[in-house]
């Protein structure tokens, strides 16, 4: 079975769904944060191992504790997967931190800050333009006064 085959893709998504349910409902470890999300699962083509990418919304300490809790619960999770998913081999679970969501949030914040800064810069430019425009009006008023005196 190839890594990107349809069968492998279906297995990946099924393992991800089952692990999400198991982590949410079955595991009672207090180290595992309630804001834990399984972002993706990559089951090896030989079904021996599965890399489980986990995202935790919280502090780095919470993330570290959650990964430790998941690693200690890995044999239990593997046994539950064997009961719910009918596979030739039940993969060994390898948990890895997925920081893509956190990275995306940080990038979004930086973009918002730049947009806000650009907006502030545009507002100050508008104020400067208005002041220049006002000076031009004063100049035109002086010219009209001069032309009336000539008459």
Image (cartoon, rainbow, N blue to C red):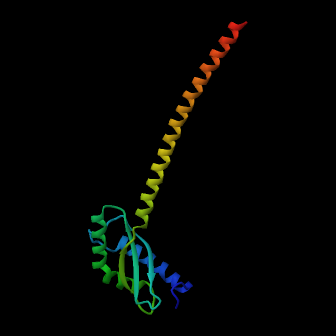
Q: Residue at the front extreme?
A: 150
Q: Nearer the viewer, residue 7 or 112?
A: 112
| Residue 23 located left or right of residue 8 | left
Res 77 quadrant in image: bottom left
Q: How many marks?
A: 0
Give the quadrant of the C terminus.
top right
Up/down of 119 relative to 92, above or below: above
Which of the pair 143/99 is nearer the observer?
143
On screen, residue 68 above or below 125: below
Task: Give above or below for 129 relative to 105.
Answer: above
Q: In which quarter of the image is residue 30?
A: bottom left
142 or 37, which lies in front? Answer: 142
Residue drawn where x is 30% and y is 78% of the image: 71
Q: Where is residue 134 in the image (x, y as percent from the top left)?
A: 58, 24
Query: Residue 95's spot in the image, x, y percent?
Result: 35, 77
The picture places residue 25, in percent across and down from the top left corner, at 36, 71
- Residue depicted at x 30% and y 70%: 66
Q: Residue furthest right?
A: 151
**Residue 143, relative to residue 102: is it above or below?**
above
């Amino acid at each position: 079975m190839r890594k990107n085959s349809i069968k492998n893709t279906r297995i990946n998504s099924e393992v991800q769904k089952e692990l999400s349910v198991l982590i949410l409902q079955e595991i009672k470890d207090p180290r595992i944060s309630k804001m834990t999300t399984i972002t993706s699962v990559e089951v090896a083509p030989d079904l021996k191992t599965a890399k489980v990418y986990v995202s935790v919304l919280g502090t780095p300490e919470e993330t570290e504790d959650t990964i430790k809790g998941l690693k200690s619960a890995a044999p239990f999770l593997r046994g539950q997967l064997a009961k719910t998913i009918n596979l030739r081999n039940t993969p060994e679970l390898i948990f890895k931190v997925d920081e893509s969501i956190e990275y995306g949030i940080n990038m979004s914040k930086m973009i918002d800050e730049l947009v806000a800064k650009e907006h502030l810069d545009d507002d100050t430019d508008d104020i400067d333009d208005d002041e220049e425009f006002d000076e031009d009006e004063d100049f035109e008023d002086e010219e009209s006064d001069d032309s009336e005196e000539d008459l």
